[in-house]
Amino acid sequence: MSKKPGLTVLAGPTAVGKGTVSTYIRDNYPEVWLSVSATTRAPRPGEVDGVHYFFKTKDEFEQLIADGELLEWAVVHGQNTYGTLKSTVNQAIAEGRSVLLEIDLQGARQVKEAVPDAQFVFLAPPTWDEMVRRLVGRGTETPDEQQRRLETAKLELAAEPEFDHTVINDDVRRAADELVSLMGLTPHPHLPEPSAR
Ligand code: 5GP
């Protein structure tokens, strides 16, 4: 039985397709308020400041931490820092929106401490081999970076029992529809094909 909370956290191993599922939800489910994270990572081609992330310098990010502006934050893959802005999330919850955070496992654990009645959904790969294929197939990371992400992924897979629900990402549309259902919303019939990310 799902909790139907205002706040749902989607986490899971690296390269499981969290980004693809959340992009699909952003494009197809305007009734979901998808949090835009702050990050020190440089934008990838096509990424827009304020839409995909708020791109910050290290100093700016440090200031957000110092000012207590972040609900959670973490260094992901030992490289860049990512965090969720408290003010925008709180406002969306106060407005009664269905809020979705797509964050890493360390962040999900922090949210569980801060907001225990949030709903925590683990996005799992259909198989380990499929996850490796997706990671290598993306082609945007160096071999060293891919190796680092795989090591992280192994640890992250073991965290599944900490979550309220598991959604298998065997198909982006199906997974997104299941997630939306868990958020207490009605999945749309006949959605368009997901756009590549
Ligand atoms: P990418 O650099 O590929 O966009 O994202 C890398 C990782 O950062 C993903 O696993 C994503 O879930 C995570 N991430 C994105 N935003 C946040 C955030 O606000 N907080 C945390 N803890 N992780 C985040």
Image (cartoon, grey):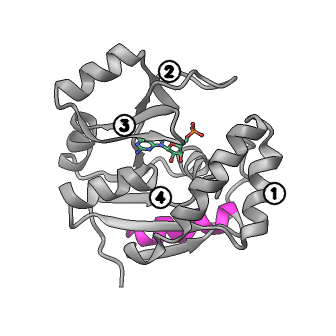
Cα–Cα gap, marks 3 and 2: 15 Å
The answer to whether mark 4 is within 8 Å of ligand 1 is: yes
Circle 3 crowding by C-alpha within 10 Å: few under 14, some 14–19, many from 20: many
The residue tagged 3 is 83
Check contact, mark 1 vs mark 2: CB within 8 A. Answer: no
- Left or right of residue 162, residue 142 in this image: right
Q: Which quarter shows the N terminus? A: bottom left
Is residue 178 rendered magenta in the image? yes
Is residue 117 rendered magenta in the image? no
Magenta stretch: give its range. 172-184
Disc nearer the start of the sequence (2/4): 4
Q: Which amino acid does label 3 sit on?
A: Gly
Q: What residue type is labelled 2?
A: Asp
Disc nearer the start of the sequence (4/1): 4
Give me the disc on residue 86: none
In this rendering, which labeled residue sits more in front, label 1 or label 2? 1
- Left or right of residue 154, residue 80 in this image: left
The answer to whether mark 1 is within 8 Å of ligand 1 is: no
| Image position, residue 135 (x, y; %) | 74, 50
The residue tagged 4 is 11
Nearest the eye: 63 or 175: 63
The residue tagged 2 is 49
The residue tagged 1 is 133
Image quadrant in which you'd find residue 50: top left
